Amino acid sequence: MLAAASRACLGARVGSFAKGAHSRRALRFLPLRARCGRTASSTPAAMAAKFGKNGERVYPEEGKVEVDGKFYRRCAAALVFNLNGDVLLGERLDRPGSWGMPQGGVEVNENASVAAVRELYEEVGMRVGETSGLELVRSLPCEPSRLFCYPAGGWLAEQGLAGQRLEFTLFHLATTEDPSGFVNLSGLEGENAEFKRVKWATMAEAVEAVWGPKRLPYERCAELAAPIIEAHLGRS
């Protein structure tokens, strides 16, 4: 258990996590070391299907959710926090200067946490049971649902979707060293690479660095995740 003074410090740090949209104070990044397995696992075809037989992109009914009369794609996001309460972010290859958490659509027969586990492996090569010190904590409720939605065009609009609803699952990685030494950003399980590089950041930094339309879901995530992270780290 942490000493009283350590608990007070931890509470203050995680408290700033919840105020991410309003705080510009940056906490230092510390180095980190862990081993990540590289063994690929098979994915059921029904869960992995993303294209029709003629090559067109399709989207299953199971992956949609209706919010305020509009349909959104269910999108799982993996929030990995370290011993300092900092979160793992990647700089997107398609949006230089934009940083975010691993994310991707919830496939057929998946729930948010199962999808987050899969996306975390596909995009950064980390998996519970293989990455040393990594554990799944819990998923966040999408309450209220509209605060987790953001608009998006492209093929989503062609499918009649207004955008995506981010559904966050929390993971804890018991370390504080630089994550660039153990992630795999090449794109696994046949997926394309998503990130150029990774780093630890406060949630304040994450909210500011994420692509603009995702800012509101990240703010709401910070509010809900802060007490969970504080409680989890407080019992370490």
Image (cartoon, helix red, strand yellow):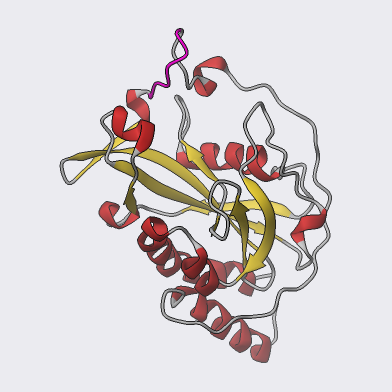
Residue located at (67% from left, 21% from top): 42
Residue located at (80% from left, 45% from top): 36
Magenta segment includes 157: no
Note whether 21 is above or below 104 in the view shown.
below
Q: How far across and how far down the image is residue 172, in percent?
A: 65, 58
The residue lying toward the viewer, choosing from 169 and 124, is: 124
Which corner quadrant holds the C terminus?
bottom right
Q: Which quadrant of the figure has residue 201?
A: bottom right
Q: Which quadrant of the figure has residue 157?
A: top left
Q: How far across and how far down the image is residue 39, in percent?
A: 79, 31
Note whether 209 is above or below 74 in the view shown.
below
Is residue 43 shown left or right of residue 173? left
The residue lying toward the viewer, choosing from 91 and 141, is: 91
Is residue 192 shown left or right of residue 63? right
Q: How far across and how far down the image is residue 73, in percent?
A: 35, 37
Which corner quadrant holds the N terminus?
bottom right
Magenta stretch in the rendered image:
54-59
Note whether 44 is above or below 115 in the view shown.
above
By secondary structure, the bulk of the magenta-drawn segment is best described as loop
- Residue found farthest to the left: 69
Residue located at (45% from left, 8% from top): 54
Q: Which quadrant of the figure has residue 154?
A: top left
Residue located at (46% from left, 8% from top): 53
Is residue 160 shown left or right of residue 105? left
